[in-house]
Image (cartoon, helix red, strand yellow):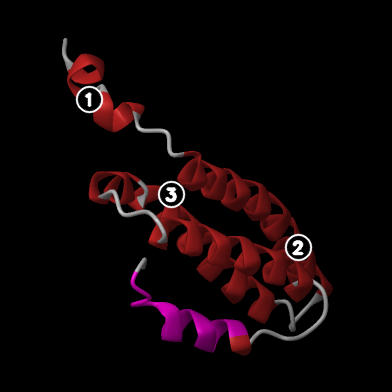
Amino acid sequence: MLKGSLDEYIAGIYDSCPAGSPKNKLDMCMEIFREARQSLNAIEDTAYRRLCDWPLAEITSDILCGCYLVRQSLYSERKKSVAAKFLDDAALRIRGACDRIKSGERAAIDKFEEITRP
């Protein structure tokens, strides 16, 4: 994900989403996703980058689910409402994961032995 292995796939699904609401919410989520990847790509610490694999995977999952839901929103107002609610919640998760990536918090790496010993 960090190297862009899913970029083409995500772009294809994203581009097939209908314009308007709730795609506007998806646009905001995509912008945060790009910000998270850009921040992580700027970090040279391999251990920290590996630590951030999970938050990046969470963001990617929310983006993909959001894309699928927005595409389904063409079929009914209820599906549009479902997509909008999901994206409102996803935006909070995505922002949190992005903040986690940008934080530089290394306790899980630096204190691994201390944290995991019985």
Q: CA distance from mark 3 to mark 1?
A: 18 Å
Q: Which residue is mark 2?
A: 84
Q: Position of residue 64 (x, y in %)?
A: 52, 70
Label 3: which secondary element: helix
Q: Which residue is mark 1?
A: 112
N-terminal-most mark, 3 or 2: 3
Relative placement, left or right, of 70 versus 10 is: right
Label 1: which secondary element: helix
Identify whether 42 is placed above or below 6: above
Relative placement, left or right, of 37 versus 20 is: left
Q: Residue at x 31, y 29 (%)?
A: 108
Which quadrant is home to the C terminus? top left
Q: Quadrant of residue 57?
A: bottom left
What residue range appears in magenta?
Answer: 3-14
Q: Which residue is mark 3?
A: 55
Amino acid at pointer 1: Phe
> In the depicted view, which residue is nearer to us: 77 or 111?
111
Is residue 95 part of the magenta span, yes or no?
A: no
N-terminal-most mark, 1 or 2: 2
Amino acid at pointer 3: Pro
Is residue 10 part of the magenta span, yes or no?
A: yes
Q: Residue at x 49, y 64 (%)?
A: 38
Relative placement, left or right, of 58 versus 87 is: left
Q: Residue at x 55, y 67 (%)?
A: 34
Identify whether 66 is placed above or below 97: below
Which quadrant is home to the N terminus? bottom left
Mark number displayed over residue 25: none
Label 2: which secondary element: helix
Q: Position of residue 19 (x, y in %)?
A: 77, 85
- Is disc 1 in contact with disc 2, using a CB cutoff of under 8 Å? no
